[in-house]
Amino acid sequence: METRKFDLKGKRPLIISGPCSAETEEQTLETCRRLAATGAVDVLRAGIWKPRTKPGSFEGVGLPGLSWMAEAKKETGLPIATEVANAKHVEGALEFGVDLLWIGARTTVNPFSVQDIADALRGVDVPVLVKNPMNPDLDLWMGAVQRLQKVGIEKVGLIHRGFSSFGLSKYRNNPMWPLAIEMKMRMPDVPMIGDPSHITGKRELLKEVAQECADLNYDGLIMESHICPDKAWSDAAQQVVPEELAELVRSIVWRKPQVDKPEFQMSLDELRSQIDQYDAELFTLLSKRMDVAEKIGEIKRDNEVMILQSSRWEDVVKRVMANAEDLKLSREFMSILLNSIHMESISRQNKVMNAKK
Ligand SMILES: O=C(O)C(=O)C[C@]1(C(=O)O)C=C[C@@H](O)C=C1
């Protein structure tokens, strides 16, 4: 069967799915066939070389897995994707006609490895997706994209798979949504694919994260599926059977960025003008508050009193936080805001107290 054409900037959302790892020929082909039968998937994926955190885990079947994927492509007509971590992987993947490559989080952290992959791809017209690095470092993520662009690869996209963090949390990898949003702002022309499987690590949480990706205007999703998820050789808890995957994909609401309805536009304009007004008031008040802090700085300077007053600040926080519920503001948001206000206040006092005469 002829392979269906696909374009990173074409169909939206782009849905990529398949097993975490190709394990056996039967498991790979059966998963791909069942995914294709649902009609909900655009690209088939499978991990062939698996970088594992601890030794002793299953590290992938290597090249034979690529021949199974190539067979799945021939049977279903769907393009295939896999992860590459070095030039040798690139060579193998290209030999087996892989249509889309991705660079994993553990590889993105290493500029040498990324450069090695970029050099191996010089002159090759295959799209490449770059997963965020393990650590929350946007420059490193951007750097990997730029290395690919520099060797002439135009079809580059991003995968947001969340960031490693220490300690227990609801998710396997912390999504740190503000960082992903910042990355979208920094590289607005580079498509962003969400990876709910690796963010959540748990199938029960896939839907909420997939919906969040859709609401943040992501261009697609990559999610793992397996014919027997509980028996998977890697990442069992985050995989679902192909039919469940399709159902999940169909349940996500992909809202549009704009709508051409005059009533909607009028209401939106009116509400946005209220926001503009409140922003103006909010920042005027903040400015007045900082002027007062500066005056405190002056009297502290004249009386040789130090800037940081922890117990006073604790009182301020307690007083403001006591209203969190009435104000319908989350404690997390208020705490971040208060912290910024405190830092700015300290910085203003620092300026008056230590001004050069
Ligand atoms: O009350 C003070 O002493 C201040 O300097 C003001 C202020 C504030 O901005 O509220 C700033 C720094 C202190 O750590 C505590 C409070």
Image (spheres, rainbow, N blue to C red):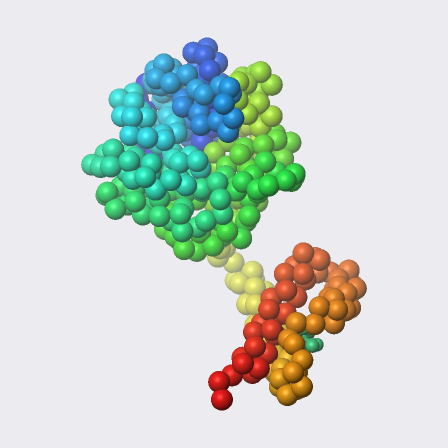
Query: In the drawing, does residue 356 fall left or right of residue 208?
Result: left
Tell me if residue 86 can be seen: yes
The residue lying toward the viewer, choosing from 303 and 241, is 303
The residue lying toward the viewer, choosing from 6 and 82, is 82
Residue 245: x percent and y percent? 55, 27
Q: Quadrant of the N terminus?
A: top left
The answer to whether 203 is drawn above or below residue 21 in the figure is below
Q: Which quadrant of the structure image shows residue 280?
A: bottom right
Residue lying furthest left in this view? 123
Tell me if residue 271 can be seen: no
Residue 174: x percent and y percent? 57, 43
Residue 209: x percent and y percent? 58, 40
Q: Which quadrant of the structure image shows residue 341?
A: bottom right
The residue lying toward the viewer, choosing from 178 and 50, is 50
Residue under the image location 62 percent in, 84 percent down: 301
Residue under the image location 55 percent in, 18 percent down: 232
Residue under the image location 25 percent in, 33 percent down: 120
Residue under the image location 60 percent in, 69 percent down: 343
Q: Which quadrant of the structure image shows residue 130?
A: top left
Residue lying furthest front in this view? 304
Residue 266: x percent and y percent? 55, 66
Q: How many marks?
A: 0
Q: Which quadrant does ligand 1 occupy?
A: bottom right
Query: In the drawing, does residue 80 fall left or right of residue 287?
Result: left
The residue lying toward the viewer, choosing from 263 and 112, is 112
The answer to whether 96 is drawn above or below residue 210 in the figure is above
The answer to whether 280 is drawn above or below residue 155 in the figure is below
